[in-house]
Amino acid sequence: MYRTGKSYMMNKLAGIQKGFELSAAVQAKTKGIWMWCVPHPTMKEHTLVLLDTEGLGDVRKGDKKNDLRIFCLSVLLSSVLVYNSRGTIDEDAVEKLRYPSHSRELAEMIKVKSNDNENNEGQFSRHFPAFIWVVRDFTLMLELNGKEITEDEYLENALLLEEQENSKIQERNRSRDAIRMYFNTRKCFAFDLPSGDKNVLQKMDEEELTPSFMAQCQKFCEYIYKNAEVKHVDDIILVSGEILGQLVYKYTEAITSSTAMCMEDVVMSISEMKNRAAVREATEHYEKMMRERGQFPTETLEEFIELSAKFEEEALQMFTDKSFNDLELNFHAQFMRNIEERKKEFSKMNEVTSLNYCDHLIKKYSKSLEQALQQDLYSKPGGYQKFQEDMAMIEEKYNSEPRKGVEVGIGVHGRGYGGTTSPPVWGPGQQGGPGSWVNQMWAGGGGDWHWGGQLL
Ligand SMILES: Nc1nc2c(ncn2[C@@H]2O[C@H](COP(=O)(O)OP(=O)(O)O)[C@@H](O)[C@H]2O)c(=O)[nH]1
Ligand SMILES: [Mg+2]
């Protein structure tokens, strides 16, 4: 409610003196919804997200639609909604909740299912947070019919329906009904006046506030830290920072375009977002691991298959952990297609690397043979013998090199040179024969040349 010390209490929860701006003036400072995130004081690795809203029923605004929008956003984004009123839980305070919690308008804004034309309001409670009514400057005794009651009993009593049947009372009864229907979990905290001194109230210096008020603040904060649950959408989607951002975007988009927010659609689109991320991250994991851990070319095809299988498995595990609500397994199928594609790319790369490396080795060891050919050194008596010896040497050196990969063979016979089995049919003084195939083979590494029986 308007000007009730909400921002002050939000700062208390955040454990900061100044965060959300307070105003001692009549005009409220807080407009719209302000968000503050702090590490959760008691739950490790959790963030406490505080949303400070402008008050409902600010007479200056005169825009009830605005109140409804703020109420909707607060309800859908939070796991605990704290409603402030001053003095008592009186008709006025219940009345202020009337408009936003009035089922017709709210039902127009929030739909539970996309094909739900006659919204079942009872289902709303699934999407509504726990409700805490905080009464500030509480001046009454917690007593009912002469018996002491708790703050919670006080709230429940205030929410009991009145029996008279005039229209005003009926309207108030509907508000009470709505509060009880939407908010299954309810709690009440009544705070004493922090100080009798107006100046102190404006500054709220802790040393000057009454011990009872300070103790109540502490009790309230501890309750929230302990009981405010991790926010979920529809009980299934845990709201991380990223998802909170998506939700804010989706809800405000729906609100500003005056279309209803359909919770079923929200769940669907968040699931899709999570699944897309699961596919992307798992595929990236496979790629990253293959790049970092793989030594290409692998010695054998089996080695490549084993390596890939290891990271395929890891990636699948990652996808399974991160994917969500992928009922028709569409995202799973996409993930499998991605992995198959990447695997093919790595396999191709493995072959090409092997090919290039073999090519490099051939070039390296055949340099002197090539020179001899160019200088016609084999075209003399005994030249053929020498050529064969030099070739055998090259072959030996080549074969002794490790990690040549999947494209390696064990021979150096080119098809253009009489096939893989026939001896060379050229002799001293013959032009072109060996020179041409050697040159082609050295230069190419492609086409239809064979290297050890495998197509290069
Ligand atoms: N009487 C009273 N004043 C308070 C209390 N808490 C804060 N204030 C003061 O009330 C004024 C408005 O507080 P603020 O937190 O801005 O109210 P908001 O408009 O509800 O956010 C400030 O001067 C606060 O110091 C309280 O429990 N009782
Ligand atoms: Mg405020």
Image: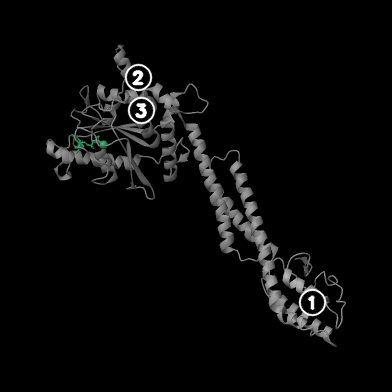
Task: Check if mark 3's residue and mark 2's residue have beta carbons within 8 Å.
Answer: no
Local secondary structure at mark 3:
helix
| Classed neighbour count for the residue bearing mark 1: other residues with Cα under 10 Å, few (<14), some (14–19), many (≥20) | some
Compare marks 1 and 3 and give the one earlier in the sequence.
3
User: Disc 2, ligand 1: is the CB inside 8 Å?
Assistant: no
The kind of residue on which mark 3 rests is Leu
The kind of residue on which mark 1 rests is Gly
The kind of residue on which mark 2 rests is Arg
Residue 303 shows in the view: no
Task: Check if mark 1's residue and mark 3's residue have beta carbons within 8 Å.
Answer: no
Compare marks 2 and 1 and give the one earlier in the sequence.
2
Residue 10 shows in the view: yes
Q: Which residue is mark 1?
A: 435
Local secondary structure at mark 1:
helix
Residue, x 18% and y 29% (percent of image)? Answer: 139
Residue, x 47% and y 40% (percent of image)? Answer: 237
Res. 1 image quadrant: top left
Res. 158 image quadrant: top left
Q: Nearer the viewer, residue 141 or 15?
A: 15
* Vertical order, 412 against 375 (above or below): above
Q: Which residue is mark 3?
A: 68
User: Which label belongs to residue 174?
Assistant: 2
Residue, x 73% and y 68% (percent of image)? Answer: 445
| Classed neighbour count for the residue bearing mark 2: other residues with Cα under 10 Å, few (<14), some (14–19), many (≥20) | some
Q: Provide residue 346's location: percent of width, then percent of height.
A: 64, 59
